[in-house]
Amino acid sequence: MQSETNKKIKKIIIVPGNFFVSRNFFSSPLIENLQQISVKEKITIYIAGVESNPISSKYFKSLKNYFEGNYNMIFIPLMGSPKSPISRFIWYLKNNFLHKTATYRFNEINNFITHKRYKEITKLKIKDKFLWKTDIWPKYLGFPFPKSKLILKIILRFISAALTSRNPQIHKHLKEIKPDLLLLGDIQSPVSFDYVSVAKKLNIKIAGNVRTWDHLTKNGPVVPGLDEYWVWNPIMRTELEIFHKVSKNKIFEVGSPQFDYYFFNKTNEKNLTDYFNIKNPKSEFLLDDDAKLIFFATNRSHRGIGEESIIHHICENIALGKYNQKKINLILRSHPYDADFNERFKEFNDYPFVRLFKSPDLSEFNPDDFREDMIKVSLLLKRSKLVICGQSTFAIDSSCTNTPVINISFDGDIEVDSKLSVKNRYNVDHYQKLTSMDGTTIIEDFISLDNEINSYLINPELKSLGRDKIKNNFAGFFNKLSSERIAERIIKLIE
């Protein structure tokens, strides 16, 4: 057995592959856990970019200084940009056709509800400001024989082939660093196929993380043949087994670090805000001690259709004292990709009980900004008496703090085609599984909205058993934090 001083230095490369994964990994307690094991276990950690595409040199330099200066982790480019016309064409073909046709065919073969919804929207053939490009999936992506498993198999082999996965930068990284472990943050991203293609030739051990809870029934096939597959929860484990044919002994439930702050006790919360110099949101948002707090998680305009009219309705009722609790504070929280949040909701600043809470911009990922944001959200949800949102992950966040949840399933005073309606957004596999646990209330008009707000303000224990089911089955709640479980898996894999 090697002594601590003679321990061989191990190396791992983390490829987040997406801004959401970067946020969940590097703005959560996981970053400290990674730093701890790097010292204790003598591990050199390399981080390959923060997105699925190369970033600007200025942005790269700022992140390199951040990770190397604060955590002694080496920040390296994700990949090299294609140079020749042929390599650019292959990259475009892989990302804009091959990966999409594989996703379409995989979803068609498995008959997912989400896929049926996309096909119905695509058939509309209309231009509408509420129509989102990611909801459009043309039939030619499945031509010919969309349910052919053989054709899908051929396409996946082509995606993983050396011809379509050749990137000198990736090959150089893996060959020179010779990592003991490659950790992928998004195992359905095209860039992950590129990394795996090279890593397998070099006999590098690979673990892959499913980016988020809705992707296994929406975002197509996962990269095959990894040593380990990491999921948030037991539902995703089952989906990975049944639909993606991954052996159950390769699947590990590690949770998601984005939920870790919800499970900190009050002492740890105080230590967090002090250590990171974060202003307590009670003081920042001037919340009244004797007021009940309602947290409204808004969405982008094309997904939160009619939210402005719904919020106006709630504000007028609060102002007129129509709810059971006469004194209420209302927080309006932005989506990380909503660039128009301040403009869309500025009118509500005229109500003295409303507070606007702008999320940091995810397209300009700053780990410290998002850490502060995640901590503030956790503190606000613990204080809130009610959360209102559309079809959103906030239903899971709220269940972690046992805060009642109202899901909005109508478009306020906006007239829109039923296929584009907020109501139709619930016709997706992952959310139907969540609502089946009876931990949220779906409302379809203003009258039921008012009734449910009053009901929850009077009795916040309503549907608490269902929220507990959501916490356990979706957040992947365990005795240990997700950050700790991920660190343990890394150590186990490189032993």
Image (cartoon, helix red, strand yellow):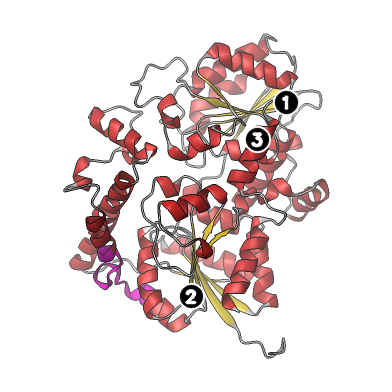
For marks 3 and 2 on the same chain, the one whose residue lies earlier in the sequence:
2
Q: Which residues are magenta?
A: 157-171
Tags 2 and 1 in contact by the CB under 8 Å rule? no
Q: Amino acid at mark 1?
A: Pro
Tags 3 and 2 in contact by the CB under 8 Å rule? no
Q: Nearer the viewer, residue 411 or 271?
A: 411
The numbered dot on residue 203 is none
User: In which quadrant of the rendered view does residue 74 lie?
Assistant: bottom right
Q: Is residue 385 left or right of residue 252?
A: right
C-alpha distance separating marks 2 and 1: 48 Å
The numbered dot on residue 460 is 1
Disc 3 secondary structure class: helix
C-alpha distance separating marks 3 and 1: 11 Å
C-alpha distance separating marks 3 and 2: 38 Å
Residue 427 falls inside the magenta stretch: no
Residue 64, percent across and down? 53, 67
User: How many labels sit on residues?
Assistant: 3
Q: Residues within 10 Å of mark 2 (few under 14, many from 20)?
A: some
Q: Amino acid at mark 3?
A: Arg
Tags 3 and 1 in contact by the CB under 8 Å rule? no
Q: Residues within 10 Å of mark 1 (few under 14, many from 20)?
A: some
Q: Residues within 10 Å of mark 3 (few under 14, many from 20)?
A: many
Residue 341, percent across and down? 50, 32
What residue would you read off at disc 2?
205
Residue at x 36%, y 20% (from the top left corner): 416
Tell me which secondary structure the magenta stretch mostly adopts: helix
What residue would you read off at disc 3?
467
Q: Amino acid at mark 2?
A: Lys
For marks 2 and 1 on the same chain, the one whose residue lies earlier in the sequence:
2
